[in-house]
Amino acid sequence: MTIEFVGVTKRYPGGTVAVDGLSLTVEDGTITVFVGPSGCGKTTSLRMINRMVEPSAGTVLLDGKDVRESEPSVLRRGIGYVIQSAGLFPHRTVLDNVATVPLLSGWGKRKARERAAEMLATVGLPAELGDRYPAQLSGGQQQRVGVARALAADSPVLLMDEPFSAVDPIVREGLQDELLRLQSQLGKTIVFVTHDIDEAVRLGDKVAVLRVGGRLAQYGTPADVLRH
Ligand code: ADP
Ligand code: ADP
């Protein structure tokens, strides 16, 4: 799915301009990484894709269709979303955490759990971890569950907001490798947010460098961005 930002600005109540005139196209089946210091508008940009945040001006299009034509709840259910803290429900087992997404999409309970088990395997988690609670997993394992849950949406689009920032560097590299492997297999359109330029260069087909004030400073391939 192609994601287009066309002259998108977000001004929060109180006056902060988080994103200022952003125009760029995330091509179908690619990973685009938004990178820049804290407060430069990365999360805000990401959240305008699934209407967690509404732009003050400009338009976000999914395959040419204005996101405002789709209900926010439908977009959020349909678009995989992974955050730094993994955001797992603490009182549900790992398997049920992942099954939540297909359940919400109207799958039967049994099929949803089968799907969840499949997704845990896809992200390289042993099946027996499915019966545990999130707190009984390592940080890296929890992030894998977060990715599994996002994949369970079976959406062509995956939004990832600093998904690997809370895990130690060795585990992070493993997760990055895994994401690249998954991507070559599944060909999703991924928008990935990080403050780490090395991670951006490693993962991105395209890298969008934002600066505080929400303006796009650079946009191109990792090689283009490193040259500047
Ligand atoms: P980043 O993800 O790059 O750290 P954010 O998109 O979270 O940046 O934030 C960009 C700017 O908008 C920051 O100055 C932040 O304080 C501000 N901001 C973010 N969310 C809100 C909000 N809900 N209300 C007011 N200001 C916000
Ligand atoms: P904060 O800006 O306070 O850091 P979070 O990044 O924790 O907020 O995210 C806010 C919450 O919104 C998350 O815990 C998440 O569960 C929920 N949420 C909103 N939209 C979605 C979505 N599309 N998919 C999954 N969770 C969502």
Image (cartoon, helix red, strand yellow):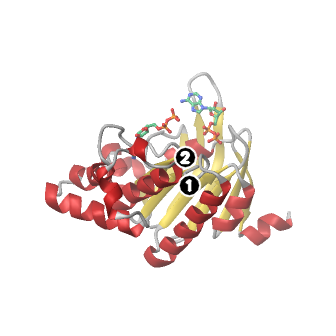
Q: Residue furthest right?
A: 228
Which secondary structure, mark 2?
A: strand
Q: Is residue 46 visible?
A: yes
Q: Which sits in the foreground, 205 or 117?
A: 117
Numbered mark located on residue 58 in the image: 2
Q: Does 60 sit above or below residue 54?
A: below
Q: In this picture, is 94 found above or below 10?
A: below
Question: Residue 145's x, y, as percent?
Answer: 41, 54
> Which amino acid does the dot numbered 1 rest on?
Phe
Q: Residue furthest bottom?
A: 185
Judged from the image, the secondary structure of the residue bearing numbered disc 1 is strand
Name the image quarter holding the C terminus. Answer: bottom right
**Which quarter of the rendering shows the N terminus?**
bottom left
Residue at 63% from the left image edge and 70% from the top image edge:
205
Type of amino acid at the residue the image marks with label 2: Gly
Lower position in the chain sequence, tag 1 or tag 2: 1
Q: Position of residue 55 (x, y in %)?
A: 52, 40
- Expressed as whole percent of the image width and height from the top left, the position of residue 176 reads 59, 64
Q: Are marks 1 and 2 in contact (CB under 8 Å)?
A: yes
Name the quadrant containing residue 17. Answer: top right
Which circle, 1 or 2, is nearer the viewer?
1
- Read off the residue under disc 1: 5
Residue 2 visible in rendering: no
Q: Nearer the viewer, residue 175 or 26?
A: 175
Residue 210 percent across, percent down from the top left: 71, 49
Residue nearer the viewer, 57 or 11: 11
For residue 188, side relative to residue 18 (left or right)? left
